[in-house]
């Protein structure tokens, strides 16, 4: 099992402090790894040692997680702030250009980081700083929102988000923490994903003891603009609106047995990301970085070698 990683405390210009793993040669190309819900930098415990001989590997516990700053208001977790944290982290560590790597919620933020920081990106101050993107089981924002409005399978799989957002869940969160809320939200079905080894489960349960952390983690869902209709709401195509293309080289790794995010999320990706490479990982659930680390590392090795 992967050992603990040394972390440093990094103060950001966005007003938060993050605990960060920063390993590998300081003059090597930088990879910034973004974890998702409900994990930590340890999502990447099999990737960080693998790539640290050739890359500077940076993996924060994002705001709201573990020991990092955890403001309690929902407004602190809107995507623009979470995206800004990543550029502020790069600034604080003296990193100019970087490759962004993300899974789950970290992948959602990675899409935004890439769109904002690609050459001629959406955010002029960041434009040109993101050279490549690696996304693992995190849907493109435009495709995901369309599926929520039009696709019964994805809408059903995402109803847990409405439970997380429901103020009535606050009582469960306060009394039973994230573990209790997960049991409530996924009652009757097992969330997609393999079983963590006992020592990793123990780490997660310890991380989830703090109720401020629990609320901060849920605020990622409450701060998101994604619209999740009820199952009985009408199904209708959203209005046609142009979405900016992501033009940098992008690797999308997709585990095919993800119950929360079925492979229909890949439909249309090539139209929005012309330079995309898609790698399917069969017989694997949502948490592909640690469920199938060899497949993830091999796909990233090949992708990152093609400069």
Image (tube, rainbow, N blue to C red):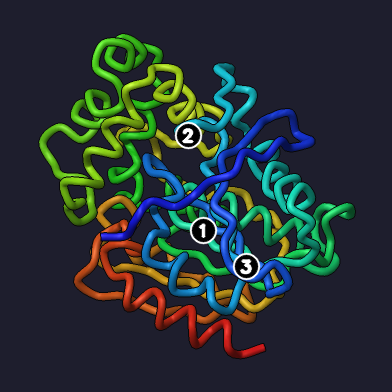
Instruction: Identify the residue shown where x is 28% and y is 43%.
Output: 156
Left/right of residue 236 with respect to residue 208 in the rendered view: right
Closer to us: 152 or 252: 252
Between the C-alphas of marks 2 and 3, the distance is 22 Å
Q: Is residue 207 above or below residue 61?
A: above
Between the C-alphas of marks 2 and 1, the distance is 15 Å
Please name which of the two marks, 1 or 3, marks the residue nearer to the observer: 3
Image location (x, y in percent) of residue 38: 37, 40
Image location (x, y in percent) of residue 113: 68, 55
Of labels 1 and 3, earlier in sequence is: 3
Of labels 2 and 3, earlier in sequence is: 3
Furthest residue toward right: 124
Q: Quadrant of residue 59?
A: bottom right
**Residue at image mark 2:** 65
- How many C-alpha atoms fall within 10 Å of the one at disc 1: few (<14), some, or many (≥20)? many
Instruction: Identify the residue shown where x is 34% and y is 66%.
Output: 263
- How many C-alpha atoms fall within 10 Å of the one at disc 2: few (<14), some, or many (≥20)? many
Q: Is residue 295 above or below residue 11?
A: below
Instruction: Identify the residue shown where x is 60% and y is 73%.
Output: 55
Image quadrant holding the C terminus, namely bottom right
Of labels 2 and 1, earlier in sequence is: 2
Report whether residue 272 is seen: no
**Residue at image mark 3:** 56
Image quadrant holding the N terminus, namely bottom left
Image location (x, y in percent) of residue 3: 34, 56
Q: Secondary structure at mark 3?
A: strand
Left/right of residue 175 with respect to residue 138 in the rendered view: left
């Amino acid at each position: 099992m992967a050992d603990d990683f040394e972390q440093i405390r990094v103060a950001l210009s966005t007003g938060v402090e993050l605990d960060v793993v920063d390993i590998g040669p300081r003059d090597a190309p930088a990879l910034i790894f973004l974890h998702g819900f409900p994990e930590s930098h340890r999502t990447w415990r099999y990737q960080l040692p693998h790539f640290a001989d050739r890359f500077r590997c940076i993996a924060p516990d994002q705001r709201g997680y573990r020991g990092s700053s955890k403001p309690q208001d929902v407004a602190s977790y809107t995507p623009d702030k979470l995206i800004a944290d990543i550029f502020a982290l790069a600034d604080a560590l003296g990193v100019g250009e970087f490759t962004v790597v993300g899974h789950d919620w970290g992948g959602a933020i990675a899409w935004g980081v890439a769109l904002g920081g690609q050459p001629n990106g959406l955010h002029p101050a960041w434009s040109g700083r993101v050279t490549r993107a690696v996304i693992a089981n995190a849907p493109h924002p435009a495709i995901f929102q369309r599926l929520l409005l039009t696709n019964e399978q994805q809408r059903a799989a995402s109803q847990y988000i409405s439970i997380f957002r429901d103020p009535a869940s606050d009582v469960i969160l306060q009394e039973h923490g994230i573990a209790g809320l997960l049991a409530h939200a996924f009652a009757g079905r097992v969330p997609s994903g393999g079983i963590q080894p006992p020592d990793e489960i123990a780490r997660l349960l310890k991380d989830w003891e703090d109720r401020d952390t629990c609320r901060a983690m849920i605020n990622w869902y409450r701060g998101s603009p994604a619209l999740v209709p009820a199952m009985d709401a009408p199904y209708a195509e959203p209005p046609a609106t142009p979405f900016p293309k992501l033009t940098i080289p992008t690797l999308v790794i997709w585990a095919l047995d993800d119950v929360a995010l079925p492979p229909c999320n890949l439909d249309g990706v090539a139209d929005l990301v012309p330079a995309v490479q898609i790698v399917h990982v069969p017989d694997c659930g949502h948490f592909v970085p640690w469920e199938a680390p060899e497949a993830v590392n091999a796909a990233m090795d090949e992708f990152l070698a093609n400069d």
